């Protein structure tokens, strides 16, 4: 998107309520809904072109919604207190469970976030790097050399195995059960997010019913794992996330229930591996089409530096954001946002993809150019992990995984570059993946150092 100003559309009064909303699209609700389900990216682009950086919608699942793509408004929204704007409704909590951090609000959300932050940040992350290296080595040993293959599923297996080991520590038959269950659980859960709940309708074509069946399998397995962990005489010596959950206490001395632990572990397993793997597949897709950048990354990988690799990850997340929306739900009488006064009950949704494609924020956004982030931290318009109190709790962990996987890829394999047109976007429900799965041709590499 190219524009010359940050003009905000004039507010539109909503009856006698005192609300001032951005211009509303005249498209019928059903047409808006079809657009969001069938091709959300193009729908967002059309809305931005037609109405500018803020517009009012009424779409299925989310209802009355204000869509924004202005970094100033996005930052203001992220800084809004939770007693004015809570998490968007509905959110992933309806899929992952009431005990998931996505479903919690206010004090409950802050308490849970405080409980879960330590194992996903700081010095602990350094200790997980060896696990990522091991899982990459095991998975990449099965890759075909000299012929094309899609990297998305292999990256999914790497990131799933990593989070399983980090979450549970030990690797036994019960983790094999989770490896079998999780791919279908994530796939059907992602698809279910696009549709309202349709209980007992559609049979096997209903993603909610398919998800519920897999969720029942998950609950049975995770229940056995929790029970076994509680009886482990060495539980206090373990440092996996499940052990930490079982031993942790809130400030008032209470502990998480088994149901809450099951929901939170599902959140870590699902949200903690799909988006990371998808970004890695996009990275392979992008780099195979940019030989100069790839050559520089390979040279860097033979050193202890990761400056360019970090910038490349950030540029992949900018140019190919896996998650394109995040938002808040107005719970106060009104939310003041720039010139607008948005009434209670509305969702306010930030279009990440529009921000990342805006030439006012990123020079020549159509170019894949990691140098834009070398020596320059991302601006407030760079929001792949969301923002504010709802920013992804696993952002640092995800970056570490991507950094190590790419380093090992560059060190041990040669990526055959191509002049083929870039892969299109494929919606998996929650995440946007490369349409062909991030195809690549590899050959073994002999390092010169």
Image (cartoon, rainbow, N blue to C red):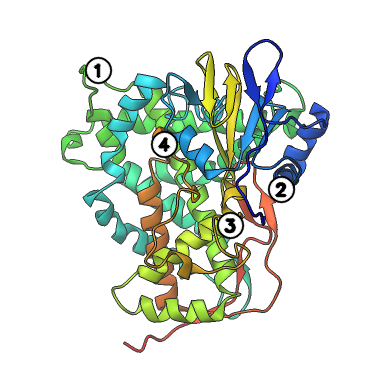
- Above or below, comparing residue 134 to residue 255 in the picture: below
Label 3: how many Cα within 10 Å (few below 14, some 14–19, many 20+):
many
Structural distance between the alpha carbons of marks 3 and 2: 15 Å
Task: From the image, tell me which residue sits under label 4.
Answer: 388
Q: Quadrant of residue 216?
A: top right
**Horizontal and vertical percent for residue 284?**
55, 68
Label 3: element kind: loop
Residue denoted by label 1: 254
The span from disc 4 to disc 2 (Cα, nearest Å) is: 25 Å
Circle 1 residues within 10 Å: few <14, some 14–19, many ≥20? few
Q: Which quarter of the rendering shows the C terminus? A: bottom left
Q: Residues within 10 Å of mark 2 (few under 14, many from 20)?
A: some
Q: Is residue 414 visible?
A: no
Mark 3 or 2, nearer chain start: 2
What whole-number distance in Å separates the C-alpha atoms at marks 4 and 1?
A: 27 Å
Determine whether 418 is above or below 77 in the image.
below
Identity of the residue furthest to the bottom in this view:
448
Q: Quadrant of residue 308?
A: bottom left
Q: CA distance from mark 1 to mark 3?
A: 42 Å
Q: Are marks 4 and 1 in contact (CB under 8 Å)?
A: no
Instruction: Report how far apart the C-alphas of labels 1 and 2 lie in the structure.
Output: 47 Å
The residue where tag 2 is placed is 45
- Residue 175 visible (yes or no): yes
The first of marks 4 and 2 along the sequence is 2
């Amino acid at each position: 998107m190219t524009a010359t100003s940050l003009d905000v559309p004039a507010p539109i009064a909503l009856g006698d309520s005192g609300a001032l909303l951005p211009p509303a699209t005249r498209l019928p609700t059903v047409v808006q809904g079809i657009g969001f389900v069938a091709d959300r990216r193009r729908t967002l682009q059309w809305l931005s072109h037609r109405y500018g950086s803020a517009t009012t919608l009424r779409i299925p699942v989310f209802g009355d919604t204000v869509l924004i793509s202005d970094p100033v408004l996005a930052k203001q929204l992220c800084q809004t207190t939770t007693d004015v704007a809570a998490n968007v409704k509905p959110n992933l909590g309806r899929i992952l469970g009431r005990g998931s951090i996505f479903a919690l609000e206010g004090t409950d959300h802050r308490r849970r976030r405080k409980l879960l932050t330590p194992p996903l940040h700081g010095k602990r992350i350094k200790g997980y790097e060896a696990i990522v290296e091991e899982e990459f080595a095991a998975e990449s040993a099965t890759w075909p050399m000299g012929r094309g293959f899609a990297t998305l599923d292999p990256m999914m297996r790497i990131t799933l195995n990593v989070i399983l080991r980090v979450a549970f520590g030990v690797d036994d038959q019960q983790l094999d059960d989770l490896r079998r269950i999780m791919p279908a659980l994530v796939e059907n859960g992602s698809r279910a997010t696009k549709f309202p709940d349709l209980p007992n309708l559609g049979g096997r074509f209903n993603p909610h019913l398919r998800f519920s069946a897999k969720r029942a399998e998950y609950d049975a397995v995770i229940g056995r794992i929790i029970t076994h962990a509680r009886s482990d005489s060495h539980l206090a010596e373990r440092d996996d996330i499940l052990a930490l959950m079982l031993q942790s206490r809130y400030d008032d001395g209470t502990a998480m229930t088994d149901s809450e632990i099951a929901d939170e572990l599902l959140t870590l397993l699902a949200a903690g591996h799909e988006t990371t793997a998808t970004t890695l597949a996009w990275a392979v897709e992008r780099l195979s089409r940019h030989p100069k950048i790839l050559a520089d990354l390979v040279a860097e990988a033979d050193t202890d530096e990761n400056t360019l690799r970090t910038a490349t990850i950030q540029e992949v997340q900018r140019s190919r954001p896996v998650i394109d929306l995040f938002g808040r739900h107005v719970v106060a009488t009104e939310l003041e946002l720039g010139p607008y006064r948005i009434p209670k009950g509305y969702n306010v949704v930030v279009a990440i993809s529009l921000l990342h494609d805006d030439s006012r924020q990123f020079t020549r956004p159509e170019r894949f150019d990691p140098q834009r982030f070398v020596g320059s931290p991302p601006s407030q318009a760079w929001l792949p992990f969301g923002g504010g109190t709802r920013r992804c709790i696993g952002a640092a962990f995800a970056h570490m995984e991507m950094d190590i996987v790419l380093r090992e890829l560059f060190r041990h394999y040669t990526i055959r570059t191509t002049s083929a047109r870039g892969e299109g976007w494929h919606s998996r429900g929650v995440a946007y993946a490369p349409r062909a799965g991030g195809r690549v041709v590899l050959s073994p590499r002999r390092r010169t150092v």
